[in-house]
Image: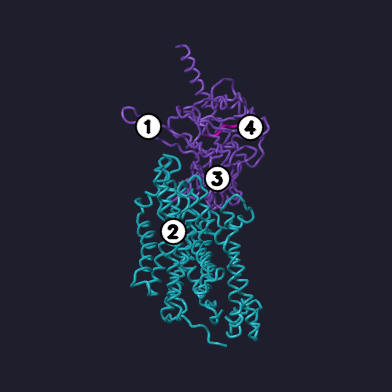
Chain colours: A cyan, B purple
Amino acid sequence: MKDSPAKTGTPRGLKFFYYLFLGILSIFGAVVIVQRLVIGMKVTALSSTIAWGMWVAFYIYFIGLSAGSFLLSTLIYVFGMKRLEKVGRMALVSALFALFGGLGFIWMDLGHPWRFWRIFYNWNYTSVLAWESLFYVFYILVIMGELWFLMREDFSRLSQEKTGGLGWLYRVLAFGVQTPSAEEEEKKLHQNSMKWVRILGIVGIPLAIGVHGGTGAIFAVVGARPYWFSGLFPIIFLVSALVSGAALMTFLYAFFGQRDEDHPSIVQEMAKLMVLFIFIDLLLLFAEYLVGWYSGIPTHAKIYHIIMFGPFPYTFWLGQVLMGMLIPILLALLPFTRKNVYFLGLAGLSAVIGIVAVRLNLVIPAYILPVLKGLDTAYYDKRWTYSYFPSYMEWATSIGLIAIVVLLFSVACEILPLFPWKTKEN
Amino acid sequence: MNEQENTKAESRREFLGKAMLAALGTAFLAGQVEAKASEAAPKEDFEVPEGDEHLIRMQRELKEALKKPAKERRWVMVIDLRKCVGCHACTISCIAENKLPPGVVYRPVIEEEVGSYPNVSMRFLPRPCMQCDNPPCTPVCPVHATWKDEEDGIVHIDYNKCIGCRYCITACPYGARSFDFGENYSDQTPKTSEYEEAPSFDWGKKWERKNGDSPIGNARKCHFCIHRVKEGMLPACTTTCIGHATYFGDANNPKSLVAELIGKPNVMVLKEELGTHPRVYYLV
């Protein structure tokens, strides 16, 4: 057969330090997560009044990354954007691991993590959160199914080529699929695979919209919090998910994609998509802020004031606006940076980090104003406060869990055939 | 006029004495209930004294209501904001009754300054759980751990089912739910105080806060002291209110004190526009 796909050009030494760094962080993460599970929720800086904090922000961040990456892959496999085909598998793999990250964060956030199974056992159909949990499960299955159909031919080839543990792993992953030797049949198998990928992709579109739009709905249905209580809220979640997905793919493909003649054009295409989504996001954000602010109703308008000029203005101005919007837009549009894949990759990275600020600002400000006037001074207790800054343990577990997810994702990217065996025509 | 005042004062004095006795009695009874929690102690059918004092009357009406089938009762709380002096006795008695840890408070009292000097006064607003007839907190629970009980009309929480996601805390428009972080007031002192190790009886069940077990890691809230009410005792906040500002009873009994009080134009509920239909009424 042909040569195996061109490996990315990362030097060996750099890779070693990358894995060493991630490995150390992951072990640290595992330790602090166990600590969190043993000690309980008192390790957080949360209170009875600010009930959701950084972990929930990271939960919606990762769910957003996942839904965004997945929807991007459907552009390729369902809507036939052939130019981006080489990004497809990477998008699906990151969708899968980002989802694991999101679920890890929300699991860690439960007061009784070991009772999570009750969501399925005592499933309550009136709860958006319960629906979401179902969505996540089906969504994982669809992503895994799609990945398998995409990769099964490569698994079977790799299982013949590799020996030892890896060969065994590929044999298991191939599930008994064998690439026929005849070219005619090989083509047939491939067509069958792509048919299934397309079907699963179609099923996945409403699922992915449900996964992140629904995650937005978890917040939007809460009538008690005017900041969230709007029909636009789930849509903002979706669009910012698309931003983060496109940004992540731009970054990953710019730095770790397949270096061939298509590489620059693919990265540029992704960056354009990202900018398009950022502009839609900006429009929605403007609509939401304008309507909320214009009325001047304190429970709604004050929150925007708090976000922009409150205790953490940098989250909004530096995170959400500068890193999440301005830098990516400028790098992707300025004439001397827009052709350079590395600048575009950095634009993606900037947006990926900036979206963290977006997520923090979607969750926490809703709690800053007491639901009843004067409730903030009605009782004095450190768990009855209206200010929040994540505790050391919240930072540590968050960094640790992110390191674990990135490590698993990186290993998966090393093992899985991320790019098609040979670029197929037609 | 004067005579009337005198009799009023007299009866007030008389009442205070009775209230002291009642309070002592309840404390004693509570102690008894705790001591004999394991045995099925025969329920003591105590005599309610004659008289029209609020506590006595509510106590008598409570006993009458308990004779009715559960579904025909409608427990409501009425709080007279004109009488509330902001002493926080209800907050404290609730914490004592339910052995609430740091961060968990079922009935804080909101204090607000009204007007400007020299026309200035304080307004106090005790805030228990509203026990809404259309609660926004129950449908959001992913695991059916909280519900509007058909029998007693209280918004219940099953601590053993609750996974601690805190969605209900987020959804309550009154901030009536709090989270048990598993802390103790005596943390970082050499010894956990005894009162913190004593079990609580939320929802009529015995709860020991140990080793991260429920109710640690759960959403917790006011339950109208339903464990007391079932035994014929008024909620702790009601019996300890020094200003007679808190009333409790069965609004389905048209002759009851609470029914009398909420049938007046000076009654209001919090955030009526949300359609939650609270069972806590305020007199203004």
Magenta-tinted stretch: B232-236
Q: Give the crowd class for mark 3: few <14, some 14-19, many >=20 residues within 10 Å.
A: many
Discs 3 and 4 carry the same chain letter: yes
Q: On the rendered structure, is A63 left or right of A379? A: right
Q: Chain of mark 3?
A: B
Q: Which residue is mark 1?
A: B114
Q: Is residue A130 above or below residue B3?
A: below
Which residue was labeled with disc 3? B137
Amino acid beneath label 1: Val
Disc 2 from disc 3: Cα separation? 31 Å
Q: Quadrant of residue B227?
A: top right
The percent coordinates of residue B190 (x first, y second) are 44, 50
Secondary structure that dominates the magenta span: loop
Most foreground residue, B178 or A226: A226
Residue that label 2 marks: A281
| Mark found first going from the N terminus, 4 or 1 | 4
Q: Are marks 2 and 4 in contact (CB under 8 Å)?
A: no
Q: Distance between the Cα atoms at labels 2 and 4?
A: 52 Å
